[in-house]
Amino acid sequence: ATVNLVVKPAPFSTADSNDFTLANQTININSSTTSYTVNIPIIDDTLEEQKAEYFVVSLENPTGATISGDHSATVYIVDNDKPAP
């Protein structure tokens, strides 16, 4: 069987479209798929951030399967503009 899942950013986060790039993506999984990598480009802007930011991605709209367990993941963007104390 083939499973189709949509990966998309969830509506809550402290990061915005200036911090990362993620368009909705469809993952096609078949019986030989053991893992799948979703690439999310992080944009290193010149703004000095006050803290690490985060965004949430979720798996939705399964076709041919069900999602069990947690269907979302939180991605943290650690600020690299300030040196560690």
Image (cartoon, rainbow, N blue to C red):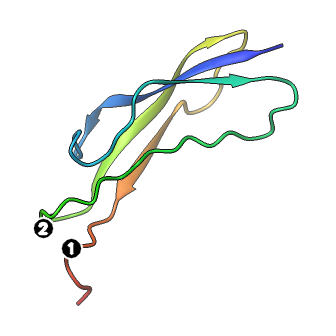
Q: Residues within 10 Å of mark 2 (few under 14, many from 20)?
A: few
Q: How many marks?
A: 2
Instruction: Give the residue drawn at x 80%, y 39%.
Output: 34
* Residue situated in front as seen by the camera: 75 or 44: 44
Q: Which residue corresponds to the image point at 38% horizontal and 31% vertical from the top-left?
A: 9
Q: Position of residue 49 (x, y in %)?
A: 15, 64
The residue labelled by disc 2 is 48
Which circle marks residue 1 in the picture? Answer: none
Q: Nearer the viewer, residue 21 or 66?
A: 21
The residue lying at 72 percent from left, 17 percent from top is: 3
Q: Is residue 82 above or below residue 11?
A: below
Q: Position of residue 14 (x, y in %)?
A: 22, 46
CB within 8 Å, label 1 to label 2? yes
Residue visible at 60% across and 20% down in the picture: 5
Q: Quadrant of residue 63?
A: top right
**Residue type, numbered disc 1:** Asp
**Would you name the residue on which mark 1 appears?**
81
Q: Amino acid at mark 2?
A: Glu
Residue 18: % across, % down = 20, 45
Relative horizontal placement of residue 16, taking residue 32 as reference (left or right): left
For the C terminus, which image quadrant? bottom left
Residue 35 vs 25, above or below: the answer is below
Give the quadrant of residue 55. Answer: top left
